Amino acid sequence: MNTPPEHGSVEIDGVPRPALIFPLTLDGLRGKRLAQAIWFVPLIALIVFYVFLLIRIGTRTDTTSHILRIFVIAMEGVFIALAVWLVSNWRKPGFVALLREGVYSRTGIGPVLVPWEMITKSGLHKLAGVLSLGLCTNATPRHGPWWMGVNRPLQRRLTGWEFSYPLPVIRGGHEFERVVQLCVADPTARLTIV
């Protein structure tokens, strides 16, 4: 999919900022329905299993049954929340936007802003056969989920990059890659993004 990006604005900390927006879509992936089923079917099976356990524990009143009941209800809540999260992300996958400040993404894992000044290098890489644009940074972004500090070194060890943007799921992925590479190489190009 090589459609042009949208000119618009994104809101960061309550402040709208002009941006070049690249919507995410699952249309560019082969076997996406199978992949969704691979995640969703076992999740439903686990939910059913925990409901069965809850019924099986029933009205027993010993201490072990109380502990098991609390555990089963907690796990049931976790699996239901995970199923809701997966379905909501399939329906509305999010977007990646280029700002004068950096690369901003809003996906199911949360919003992340990677400032241009923090990006030390960018390049293409393949992970599991999916062509992605990778970014290396010199620090953890301050706009991001709380677990980003742990994820960043893990991502670098696994893929060689702190941030990966899979190009087949980005509408206009080749343009996204071209503009990011240009902005990393030439800081003056960042002013012409929007």
Image (cartoon, grey):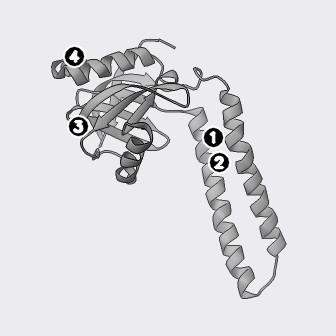
Q: Which dot marks residue 87? A: 1
Residue at the extreme top: 3
Q: Which dot marks residue 83? A: 2
Picture coordinates of residue 72, whole percent (x, y): 70, 68
Q: Bin the neighbour count of mark 2 within 10 Å (Cα to Cα): few under 14, some 14-19, many 20 and up.
A: some
Instruction: Look at label 4 and name its amino acid.
Output: Thr
* C-alpha distance separating marks 4 and 3: 19 Å
Q: Are marks 1 and 3 in contact (CB under 8 Å)?
A: no
Residue 122 seen anywhere in this rendered image of the structure: yes
* C-alpha distance separating marks 2 and 1: 6 Å
Q: Are marks 2 and 1 in contact (CB under 8 Å)?
A: yes
Q: Which dot marks residue 192? A: 4
Residue placed at 66% from the left, 54% from the top?
80
Q: Tell me which numbered mark, 2 or 3, is placed earlier along the sequence.
A: 2
* C-alpha distance separating marks 2 and 4: 41 Å
Q: Which residue is mark 3?
A: 118
In this picture, residue 57 sits left or right of residue 142: right
